[in-house]
Image (cartoon, rainbow, N blue to C red):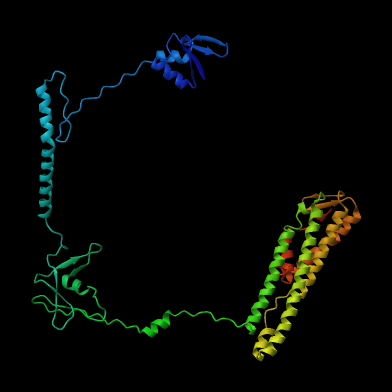
Amino acid sequence: MYLVELSPGKEELYRSSDELALAIRKGDVDGRSRIYHRATAKWISITLHPQYKAILTTPKEEPVARPARKGWTFLGGINPAPESATEPAVSNGHLLQHWRRPLALGISGVLLILGIQLASSGPRPPWAGRGRLVTTKAPHRDLAVAPEPAGRQEIVSLASTTVWSAEESRSEVAPTEAARSIDTVPAAGVAKVARVLPRAPRLRSKSLQAALKTETPKEVDGKTVEAMLGRYAGAHDSARERLENGMRVARLGRLFAAPRLNPNGGVTDTRMSLAGAANFIRVYRQQQAAVEAAYQDSVVIFAKRFGWSPKEVKQWYSREIRTEDPALEVLSGTLLSGIDSILGVLDAQAGAYKLRGTAIAFEDPTAAQRYGELRQQIKEQVDAAVAAGGATSAGPTGLLLRAIGTTSLPRET
C-alpha cells in the first residue's frame, strides 16, 4: 500500500503499484506530492520514488493514424472528402451511395443467371436418361410398368463399372404386394418376358401364436421331493454363508506371517482370532447336523402322507451330500489344535525369541525343540488336507487353508 499526500491536508491511499501508476499518469499525483516512507517514518517527495521516475522517462505512445478507406468496389464505403472539399462534393458522395448497392446486386443477379444457363446447356451424364416410367392399368394385370417409346437406355452404377439396361432395372422394382406378380410391357419392337417374383408364404395365425408363446416356469409343489431338495440345499447354503461371514470377522488372513508371530502382541491377537474361527466352525457343524436330522424326519413324514413313489424316495437318498467330509473334518480339527499349540509355545516364550526373516531363534533350547516338533506336525497336516481335496472344498477345511495361504512357519535355529 502507498500513502500519498496529493496536496497539503489531502491524503490518498493506493492499494497497489498499479493504482499508483495510474494516478501518476492521470496527473492526480505530480511533482508536488509527497509519499510516506515506512522505513524512515517520514514524508518524502514523490519524485524520489522509482516508479514515478520510470513513468516520467517512458515516452508517451501516440495513436497510429488509421489509413483512409478506399472504396474501389460497388459495395465498399465512400472515400472521405478532403479537408478542402466543398459542400457540393459531400452531396455527390451521398448520391453515389444511393446507386452503388442496387447496381452491385443487379450485376450479381445477371452473373448468377448466366452461370445457371451455362450449366444446363452442358453435356448430360450417361445415367441421366430422358425416359420416364408410366404406370397404367392393364386389363388382366394388377400393375404394369411401361416405358415411353424411346431407344435402349443404360443405367450406370457410380459404385461399380456395371451397366444395366433400362428394361432390366425396371423389372427389379420391388412390388407393393408379395402375393401378386408384376409384368413389364415391352417397348415397341422388343419382346421381353419379365421376371415373376415367387409367391410369399402365408403364416397361419395359430402357428404364429404358438411360435410367439413363451413357456412360463412351472410352479413347484411344496409337497414334492423337488421342493424338499430345494429347501434342503437352501438351508445348507445359509449355514455355509454364516460360516464364511464369521471367518471374515475372525480376520485369519496370512495366518503364519511374521507380524502375527511377533511377541509384541501379535501372537496374542492371532490366538484370539483362531479361537473365534474355531467357535464359528463348531457352530457350523452343529447347524449341519440339525439340518440333516430335521430334513430326514420330514422326508419320512412327507413320503407316507403324500404317497411318494419309490422313484421319488430314491431321488432323495441319491441327493448331493452337503455335509463336511469326515476325513476333512478330522484333519481340520487336528490342524486347529496344532496351530493353537504352537502359538501357545510362542506366547509362553514372549521376549525370549527373535524373528529373523524366515528363521526364529529361541533362548531356551527346550522351547526350540518343542516348536520344531509342532511345526513339522502342522506341515504334514496341511499337506494331508490339500491331498484330500480340502483346498477346493467349501467347508471349514477350505476356509482354513485359504487363511494360511502361501505363508509358512519360520524354521527354528
Query: Quick check: 158 left or right of 337?
Result: left
Q: Quadrant of residue 335?
A: bottom right
| Closer to us: 179 or 7 | 7
Query: Quick check: 189 left or right of 286?
Result: left
x then y, percent, for residue 331 = 79, 70
Q: Residue at x 12, y 49 (%)?
A: 115
Residue 225 visible to an observer of this rendering: yes
Q: Quadrant of residue 339?
A: bottom right
302 vs 330: above or below:
below
Q: Quadrant of residue 178?
A: bottom left
Total of numbered circles in the picture? 0
Q: Residue at x 12, y 25 (%)?
A: 90
| Closer to us: 103 or 116 | 103
x then y, percent, for residue 408 = 76, 58
72 vs 129: above or below:
above
Q: Residue at x 18, y 66 (%)?
A: 155
Residue 393 visible to an observer of this rendering: no
x then y, percent, for residue 239 = 71, 70
Query: Quick check: 221 left or right of 404?
Result: left
x then y, percent, for residue 91 = 11, 26
Residue closest to the far front = 9
